[in-house]
Amino acid sequence: MPVALATFSGLLEGSPDAQALRRALLALGVETTVAAWNDPSVAWDAFDLVVVRCTWDYTEYRDDFLAWAERVPRVCNAPDVLRWNTDKRYLRDLADAGVPVVPTLWDPDGLPSHWPEYVIKPAVSIGSRDTARWGPGEEDQARAHLRDLRARGRTVMLQPFLTAIETAGETALVFRDGEFSHAARKAPILRANAGIEGPVTGDDSRGQITPATATDDQLALARQTLAAVPGAPHLLYARVDMVPGPDGSPVVLELELTEPNLFLDKSPEAAQAFAQAISTRL
């Protein structure tokens, strides 16, 4: 029962996460292939399951990526989940469902005077690409950032920079088949007065990952978030990223259901448990 782990052409061996998952699957006797999602030579219908992992170029080819997912007979997560989740306007759906999320202005006409610092980013992006943190005295640069994104036809998001991120970072809660697996802490990524720094890479000092222990409040928010996903799909994997809000309570920054790093190296049993979940689906 062969399984494919989908990657992209710039990382044909897969991410460290995908490699760990492949080793765990092989230990269970599951034949596994790592292949680029847009490789025309791959017969995707020959696999009993295709698991989307590090398809980290999809933001440049979103329509093609979603069309590919629709053509794959058996893919996780499901194509309708991928379509919903690859545009961050899903945050509006979560907010409408009562989930506490980071306040967001969509395609704003101007800059908010009541936020000392704010973050501008496109709704379709990954790894902090085209994202920047702006503050007092940087209004001209921020407006130029807005204009540039709009000129490229991008939906613009404007959010307050929540200062607790500087000390608490982001907490990522990872779920497997709807059950909590483990948590990790991501150090701050966006620096003040740095402008648009480009995507975080493997050797980048920003966003360093360490194991974390999820609090009861964080677990409750993560479960509320997953329950608000349209159609209540059966998710093989999910990652809920949250930060402390102004009152200290957690709020959702992002919900990662497409190609998230699952930080399998931060939990001793995580790779084996995810491999078992895949084997069970087979």
Image (cartoon, helix red, strand yellow):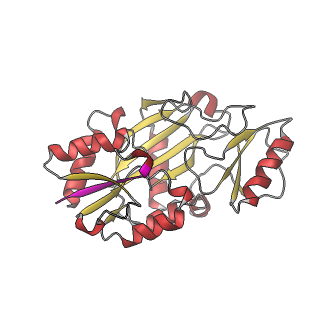
- List x then y, in percent, for residue 15: 38, 42
Residue 87 as seen in the image, left or right of residue 42 = right
Farthest residue, direction front: 41
User: Does residue 8 show up magenta in the picture?
Assistant: yes
Q: Residue at x 41, y 49 (%)?
A: 54
User: Does residue 137 show up magenta in the picture?
Assistant: no
Between 79 and 15, the residue placed more toward the observer is 15
Between 2 and 81, the residue placed more toward the observer is 2
Which quarter of the rendering shows the N terminus?
A: bottom left
Q: Residue at x 52, y 60 (%)?
A: 86
Between 180 and 17, the residue placed more toward the observer is 17
Residue 67 in the image: above or below residue 213: below
- List x then y, in percent, for residue 99: 56, 56
Residue 102 seen by the camera: yes
Residue 232 as seen in the image, left or right of residue 113 = left
Residue 70 as seen in the image, left or right of residue 93 = left
Q: Residue at x 39, y 59 (%)?
A: 37
Residue 182 as seen in the image, left or right of residue 161 = left
- List x then y, in percent, for residue 121: 67, 50
Q: Residue at x 44, y 44 (%)?
A: 219
Residue 120 in the image: above or below residue 170: below
Residue 231 seen by the camera: no
Q: Would you identify the image quadrant in which residue 170 lies?
A: top right
- List x then y, in percent, for residue 3: 24, 57
Q: Would you identify the image quadrant in which residue 249 lies?
A: top right
Which quarter of the rendering shows the C terminus?
A: bottom left
Q: Which residues are magenta?
A: 1-9
Number of marks in the rendered image: 0
